[in-house]
Image (cartoon, rainbow, N blue to C red):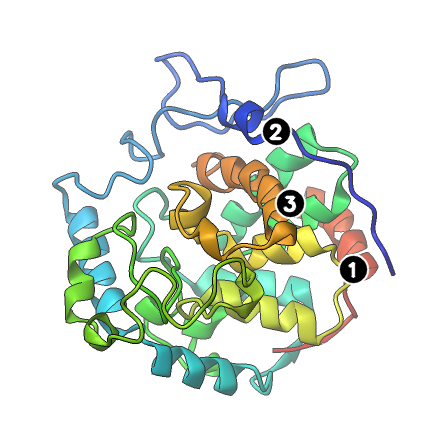
Amino acid sequence: MTISIEKPMFVEEVSAFQKKSENNTGDLTMASEHDEAFLAPEMNAFGRQFRNYDAENERQKSVEEFYRLQHINQTVDFVKKMRAEYGKLDKMVMSIWECCELLNDVVDESDPDLDEPQIQHLLQSAEAIRKDYPNEDWLHLTALIHDLGKVITLPQFGGLPQWATVGDTFPVGCAFDESNVHHKYFSENPDFHNQAYNTKSGIYTEGCGLNNVMMSWGHDDYMYLVAKKNGSTLPSAGQFIIRYHSFYPLHTAGEYTHLMNEEDKENLKWLHVFNKYDLYSKSKVHVDVEKVKPYYMSLIRKYFPENLRW
């Protein structure tokens, strides 16, 4: 099944986010058919700047500790081990929506902007995109499912630690770019001192394509494997978003582009579109789950089998 998708706005247009007035500090603003597009708030739900990893507060301290552990432990050997283990998809059989509900038991300790149930973040992202891109139903569904891989931190999925589940992702097998959050902790990673891994391209070649690059292990890569191995018909751009939405050093800092091929560059345009909604739609304003559920169930049936191996 081939899905044709329209070209997204150019990155420059997507990046030119309109800001809210100073009186609005974190509420979700969704555009109607007659209003302007989704407006990116200046502050998160805690009244602070988004992705501010330097602020002095207890949540930021726990986030920094998370990244310390992540940067120390995410090695080439660890990633290979996790991809082999979780690529078996032998943990559970369930539907996409069942996984959405299961995700409510997960708290993302790496996120400085959100402490709401995960299903609310999924629906907030999906509904905001749905308003602005009503004809791209694959993008609505991609937003709904992009974080489902976080279930690997639950006991029935092996109970992986947070540092092996969430947080920004980055390539392993090559130098850790300084754009990575809390980069200083990479000095304690065994791969940091491995000469085969500490050059710009490391074990890869320029233009090899991100599909040939090992990423730090977490929910992005796991959900990508689930979608791919269960025969999802989501277009390439949707699967790219799932796999790389946490790859902030690429889609926000603009690093690691030397590893991309032409298909990656096209898909990155859609990831830039998606990121606005993934980051800025986090809110205390809840979506009525039962009201929107029928629509998303129809999309799940369109792009996925009824039950999936996880």
Residue 213 to residue 270: above or below: below
* Residue situated furthest right in the rendering: 1
For the residue labelled by badge 1, is the local secondary structure a helix, a strand or a loop? helix
Residue sitting at x 57%, y 57%: 242
Residue sitting at x 37%, y 55%: 168
Chain-order first, disc 3 or disc 1: 3
Would you name the residue on which mark 2 appears?
Answer: 10
- In front: 148, or 54? 54
Residue 278 seen in render: yes
* Marks 1 and 2, how far apart at CA: 26 Å
Q: Which mark is residue 266?
A: 3
Residue 227 to residue 85: above or below: above
Rate crowding at label 2 as few (under 14), some (14 to 19) or many (20 or more) other CA atoms within 10 Å: few
- In front: 27, or 308? 308
For the residue labelled by badge 2, is the local secondary structure a helix, a strand or a loop? loop
* Marks 3 and 1, how far apart at CA: 21 Å
* Image depth: mark 1 or mark 2 in front: 2
Residue sitting at x 73%, y 35%: 7
Marks 3 and 1 in Cβ contact (< 8 Å): no
Type of residue at label 3? Glu
Identify the image quadrant of residue 13: top right
Q: Which mark is residue 303?
A: 1
Rate crowding at label 1 as few (under 14), some (14 to 19) or many (20 or more) other CA atoms within 10 Å: some
Chain-order first, disc 1 or disc 2: 2
Identify the image quadrant of residue 22: top left
Percent position (x, y) of residue 86? 52, 82
Residue 246 seen in render: no
Percent position (x, y) of residue 153? 41, 72
* Image depth: mark 3 or mark 1 in front: 3
Q: Quadrant of the N terminus?
A: bottom right
Type of residue at label 2? Phe
